[in-house]
Amino acid sequence: MIFTACSGSDTSLPRDLMKDTAPFDSVFMDVASHACHELHALMVVKDGEVVYEKWDHGYGPDHLHVMWSASKTFTATAVGFAVQDELLDVTDKVVDFFTPEELPEVCSDRLKKMTVHDLLIVSSGFEDDCIGRADSGEDFDWAAATLASEIVFEPGSRFEYNSMNTYLLSVIVSRVTGKRVDEYLEDKLFSPLGIENYMWKQSPQGYSAGGWGLYMRTEDFAKMGLFMLRKGVWNDKRLLNEEWFDEAMSAQIMQYAGQGLTPDDVAKMTPDAWNQGYGYQMWMCPEGGCRLDGAWAQLCVLYPEKDLVIAVQA
């Protein structure tokens, strides 16, 4: 597995740290009381200022922490920039971005109909998720293996989490921009936000992993949340159009879509953080929030009405 890395000076968020930190400090104690649970970092940004920050022993402000699937939202944002640059549209067909060598010898009707939008909302229908093989370091063509997988439902009709959807988005962004996703975001997002210290895994074919493999600091994770909370504006300068965030940060598909549930079945479901809907590679939360979400609690939770960002690495 190849890494791409960038490092440099830091551009910090403004601070107005609370004097009474006990309520947040107690979260670390609570997590530590559960066997095998670890809270590595917690940062709270209210009204654009860091009001609380703490790292556990062995971690710190400069530690590059694995993001796991929270990486997905960064890749989706790269798609947003490509759409803004008129290089791409969410209605574009997936097969149009891949070579005959990468596509199956005979493309199914479902594959021919699949769109970028279907990938963004993890509704491709691919039966196989090759992330296990990919993350093990096995040398194979990730895109070709995914595109060859059987498509078990109509794209767009059902929510089915699959990290290779995001890898295909990474490849598509690279095909239309001529840059890896991390290189494209360096110009469009990372540099303007002062995110100068990060790494992102690459596939054997030289593309950013897309759906996982991004490593970054807690504060930079929080910056991404604040950028999204501001709907594409940073330091009073618009970087990405507001319409993108209106789509990305709203429920594009429900997690129970395509499962054959009746309205009565849905009404009886217990509301929780996993059935609020899914946007563009991010999850909706109860009470109007949304979140970037990676395995083992890599969380950046946004509540626009409260002007609040909470970044967690665990």
Image (cartoon, rainbow, N blue to C red):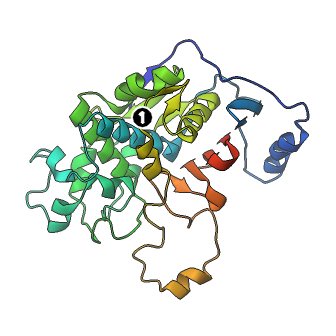
In the picture, measured across the screen, residue 197 lies left or right of residue 122, that is right
Q: Which residue is mark 1?
A: 240
Q: Residue at x 61, y 83 (%)?
A: 268
Q: Residue at x 50, y 84 (%)?
A: 263
Quarter of the rendering containing residue 54: top right
Quarter of the rendering containing residue 287: bottom right
Rendered position, 180 above or below 314: above
Q: Residue at x 72, y 29 (%)?
A: 58
Q: Residue at x 20, y 57 (%)?
A: 148
Mark 1 crowd level (few <14, some 14–19, many ≥20, 10 Å Cα): many
Q: Position of residue 223 (x, y in %)?
A: 59, 31
In the picture, measured across the screen, residue 94 lies left or right of residue 265, that is left
Question: Which of 303/113 is in front?
Answer: 303
Which secondary structure lies at badge 1? loop
Q: Position of residue 99 (x, y in %)?
A: 12, 44
Which quarter shows the N terminus?
A: top left
Which quarter shows the C terminus?
A: top right
In the picture, measured across the screen, residue 124 lies left or right of residue 72, that is left
In this orientation, does residue 209 appear? no
Question: Which of 134/77 is in front?
Answer: 77
Q: Amino acid at mark 1?
A: Leu
Q: Position of residue 311 (x, y in %)?
A: 66, 40
